[in-house]
Image (cartoon, coloured by chain):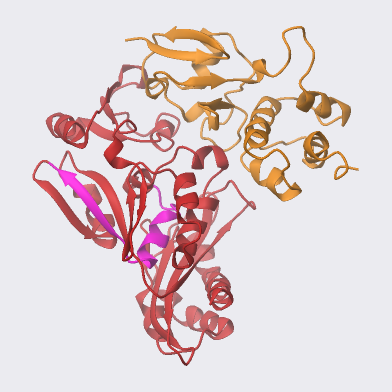
Chain colours: A orange, B red
Amino acid sequence: MPVNLVVNGEERAVAAPPLTPLADVLRDTFFLTGAKHVCGEGFCGACTVLVDGKPAVSCLTPVGLLEGSEIRTVELLADPSGDLSPLQAAMERHDAVQCGMCFPGILMSLTALFETDAAPSRDTVRTALAGNICRCTGYERIVEAALSVCQPEAAQ
Amino acid sequence: MVAAHEARLHVATSVDDAVAVLTEAGGDAVPMAGATWLMRAELRDEPIRPLYVALGRIEALKGVEIAADAVSIGACVTHAELAGGLAGLPEMRGLAQAAGHAATPAVRAVATVGGNLAASGFAAADLAPALLAADAEVEVAGSNGTERLPLAGYLATRDQAAAGSLIVRVIVPRGDCVSAHTRLPLRVAGDYPVAIVSMNVAVSPDGTIADLRIGVGSVEPVAARWTALEEALASQPLDPEAAATAAREHAGVFAPRDGVEASGAYRVRVLPALVRRAIEALAASR
């Protein structure tokens, strides 16, 4: 039986085995390749998307549990014209992106954070990123970029 | 042997429905809540079951209900919901810390209380030692009705439970006490803890320990009470250094597990430091 989802605002149905990870459905069925299926155990956070507004590791999310759910991925952040979102632009401005493997997940974790806390503290930003491992940057530029979006003075 | 793509999913509509389907399937089916543990099975070469019974749509398994004498926690309450639901209850601070610092934000948003306790291979579960320290009981539904048993008894027998058994809720007594939860992950966050120490203490007017329960997790395969240390600290003041010394003297009771992230000997070696931190936190929260 197909599972009905709303993916980035579009109603979609997928007839995948119920234990198929959402990450695989997004990448292989819907060709939304922003979320990366990396560790497969929920440790790295590279597959983070939003399920009903909350960050979720899509590698551990079986599609069979998602009937009627709203999924948002990194592909939704930029304007259809190609203009980056304020968060994406801040990452570029702070030169925070290196290899990019972890970044879709980092952007979605921060998107979820900003939707519940418009002006998070530095500690809150770091806590929100506790499940997103970056092996390139050391995180500081990422945190600075995030703070520059919500607290321009704090990031100076 | 079933491949992951061959497994079926039944989305249960009620506890009775879930119990009936699980019972009929015998050992071929298991409950599924947040799925964060079960979804790792294929990667870890663990067996895939032919049938999974999804519990997330059952309203009776949701919600944190706070009464004067106890807190009732539905089995499908997530770690994040539990941490939020216990905020403002001083005696539940340790349990709230356990729920609010386990794993990562994305896992806490879906991983449930029932799943944390039912995952028998999950030695590093944070809620198990915290709930042991809190003297929690577990309500389990099965084909013969519902029974309530101490958490320690549930943890000891969960692998032998009859097909169809299902945690419905966890009941935590309230009282005039304080609690703390200390853990040592190798990273600051987002990692399985090497060892966990949870404490719940009632303090006499003279400042000495009147009643103390200590839960230890991640050291042995199953979380357990540290009764030898509880007895050693009875009627003693909340002295962090003295408690750490006593912990070293009574650390020989454990049969620790080796793992890729830490040896069994190391897990035991860090316990006195965790005990010291827990006593410091208890003293500070009085």
Tell whether A15 sits left or right of A99: left
Residue A103: % across, % down? 71, 27
Residue A148: % across, % down? 83, 36
What residue sits 43% from the left and 76% below the top? Answer: B201
- Displayed quadrant of residue A39: top right
- Looking at the picture, tell me which residue is in the foreground, B55 or B161: B55
Is residue B144 something one can see in this rendering?
Answer: yes
Tell whether A150 sits left or right of B48: right
- Displayed quadrant of residue A116: top right
What residue sits 40% from the left and 66% below the top? Answer: B215
User: Is residue B277 placed above or below B61 in the rendered structure?
Assistant: below
User: Is residue A129 placed above or below B264 in the rendered structure?
Assistant: above
What residue sits 73% from the left and 36% below the top? Answer: A135
Quadrant location of the N terminus of chain B? top left
What residue sits 33% from the left and 60% below the top? Answer: B67
Residue B85: % across, % down? 45, 51
Q: Residue furthest front?
A: B68
User: Is residue A108 placed above or below A79 in the rendered structure?
Assistant: below
Specify whether residue B105 is painted magenta: no
Tell whether B161 sits left or right of A43: left
Residue A130: % across, % down? 64, 43
Q: Which residues are magenta?
A: B122-142
- Looking at the picture, tell me which residue is in the foreground, A30 or B89: B89
User: Is residue A107 placed above or below B63 in the rendered structure?
Assistant: above
Is residue B220 something one can see in this rendering?
Answer: no
